[in-house]
Amino acid sequence: MKKCNLTFIAILILSSVLTTAHINAQDRKGPPPNGERKGPPGGGHSPVQTKTLEEIEGYKIGDVATDFELKNVDGSTFSLSDIKDAKGYIVVFTCNECPFAKMYEDRLIALHNTYAPQGYPVVAINPNVSEDNEKESFAAMQKRAKEKDFPFVYLADEEHNIFPKYGAVRTPHVFLLDQEKKVQYIGTIDDNARSPENVKVKYVENAIAALENGKNIEPNFTKAIGCPVRAR
């Protein structure tokens, strides 16, 4: 009888120890079992520009942009000076595959069709162009321009030396220049990348209106929203 009691007590003690160990294991911080995670999924990145203009070390408001010579999708070489009687330039760094760039393609077409006749053409530049990337190759640019019937030039920054001068870090990323090629606005096109129907503030259009009326542009800087530039 005494032996049975000792055995029963031992079982109770062992059961208590195992229960405590299980509770402590559940309370420990760290990844839960089976690789499950609570909260937002890992690997997510914000599409909003994180660096300041000073950190990027590109053009700032008031800087005069230097002209360039880049290959257009029609095979010709293009410079800003080729546009006669321009009152300004809507220079936008974009690409073929970024979802945000695609969201803004129709809006860029509309911007060009509205403002090019007023002297403010869209000048699109692909900073990601690379023959090592089939989706961002020059041939892919030509195909995309044809598919969307771009009415504006679509230029290849093949040497990857134009976008760093401007400080383009996202696609799309807009730099509005005036007639003297002075940078007047830097940032995003409007305040709603995903839904053109719900746009409340049209930053580029407001900036052009301010230039036309001799007023200060407010705001003259917004954070670009899109995919990081991935030049190879």
Image: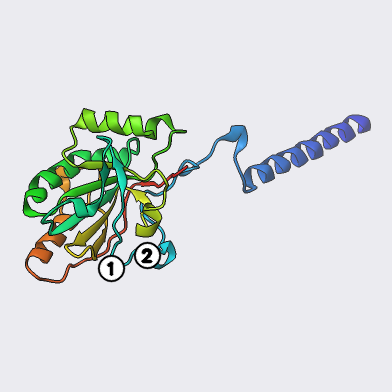
Q: How many labels does the image show?
A: 2
198 displayed left or right of 188:
left
Q: Residues within 10 Å of mark 2 (few under 14, many from 20)?
A: some
Within 10 angstroms of label 1, few (less than 14), some, or many (20 or more) residues? some
Q: Measured from the top left, where is residue 103 in percent x and y?
A: 25, 39
Amino acid type assigned to the residue bearing label 1 in the image: Ile
The label number, if any, that marks residue 61 in the structure image: 1
Q: Residue at x 8, y 64 (%)?
A: 212
Q: Secondary structure under badge 1?
A: loop
Residue that numbered label 2 is attached to:
53
Up/down of 6 relative to 84, above or below: above
Q: Which of 104 and 134 is in front in this view?
A: 134
Res 21 seen here: yes
- Counting from the top left corner in percent of width and height, residue 24 is at 68, 46
Foreground residue among 33 and 136: 136
Please state which amino acid type lies under the numbered disc 2. Answer: Leu
**Residue 153 location in percent, x, y?**
22, 42
Q: Which of 171 and 40 is in front in this view?
A: 171
Within the image, what quadrant is residue 33 found in? top right
Type of colouring: rainbow
Q: Do the residues labelled 2 and 1 touch (CB within 8 Å)?
A: yes
